[in-house]
Amino acid sequence: MLSVLPPDAAQPRKVTVIGAGVIGLSTAHELAAAGHQVTVIADQQPQQTVSAVAAAIWFPYHSENSEAADLLLARSLARFEQLSGIAETGIDLRYGLNLEGSADEDRSWAKIVTNATEAPAEAIPPIAAAGMHATVPVITMPTYLSWLQDQAAALGVQFIWRTVDSFDELQDDADVVVLAAGLRGGELTGDDQSVYPIRGQVIRLANTAGLSDWLCYDEHPQGVSYIIPRRDDIIVGGTDVDHDFNLEADPQTATEMLSRAIGLVPELEGCEILEHKVGLRPARETIRLERIEGHAVPVIAAYGHGGAGVTLSWGTAQRVVELLDS
């Protein structure tokens, strides 16, 4: 489980962050902003990572449910809301509906969303039991990742594109290593066999319908469904298949996803299909966000966010700074 410790000032360090997805970039940004000398090393550039496949909407999907994780959620929400005022970020606050399969579904996320309200009965389709309306951040990931990388670089973060096979190779150049390598997190620590992929397949549609409201229904009887309008497109999903490493889009799955989506939002009928995408969410029973001892260089783990990497990204980054400075 995550732990919450108070921050404590420390001298600037040389920090190497492994991974250039949304967790790695956010962490590199916050470390550099705190005055540390930061280098990101990754075998994938941001637009190649699973983060680039994300829809993405602020919502705790397939991740840890705990008091400490709630703090990461709240911190991330506050930062995304702040950044939504900067057009170049690709972040917009969008109104939408989260459908629920039962009347007792977990609504803890709604406690920190200022305008979350119970959806009226007329807004609930027959295949759902209840729902919540809310305005939350929707992030156009290609735009956001490029912006975030540029912001980190402007703070002095250096980027090296290569594979790291062992912490040993970093000991001469780093005082501390932050492990934000997603699925490779457990592999690199050597002591964690619990990380596994949750395969997600999505469709990117042209937004010729002019939609702006999002809709999510994780408990759809025929499979998880979400429709996320972004600035220039709509992301339709999805799948959540555990332990599936297949990165090829399946045509039958795409047909079924689109059919579910049109059933929920008929305006999608006829929207041009722009792209099919697949990503592997790095899942774990609990997020690993802690110091790890016993390696050639001190390590802070920051992986295992499941389908909530974007949602928890800024809170995770702030927590890494706290762990480093404590």
Image (cartoon, grey):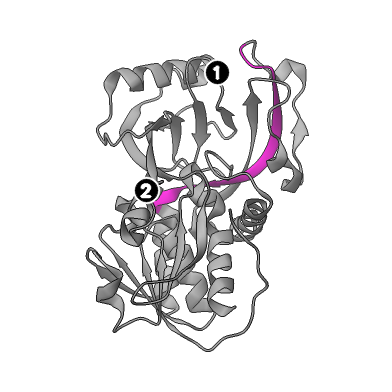
Residue in the foreground of this view, choosing between 225 and 141: 225
Residue 132 is inside the magenta segment: yes
Residue 4: tell me if it is visible: yes
- 315 vs 174, left or right, is right
Task: Tell me the quadrant of the picture where the C terminus can be found.
Answer: bottom right
| Magenta stretch, residue numbers | 127-142
Name the residue carrying label 2. 193
Residue 166, given in percent of the width and then of the height, sits at: 26, 67
Q: Determine the CA span between mark 2 and mark 1.
A: 39 Å
Q: Which numbered circle lies on residue 317?
A: none
Q: Residue at x 43, y 15 (%)?
A: 259
Question: Residue lying furthest top in this view?
Answer: 126
Q: Residue at x 64, y 60 (%)?
A: 82
Residue in the foreground of this view, choosing between 292 and 271: 292
- Quarter-wise, where is residue 119 in the image? top right
Name the residue carrying label 1. 264
In the structure shown, which secondary structural element does the residue marked by tag 1 occupy? helix
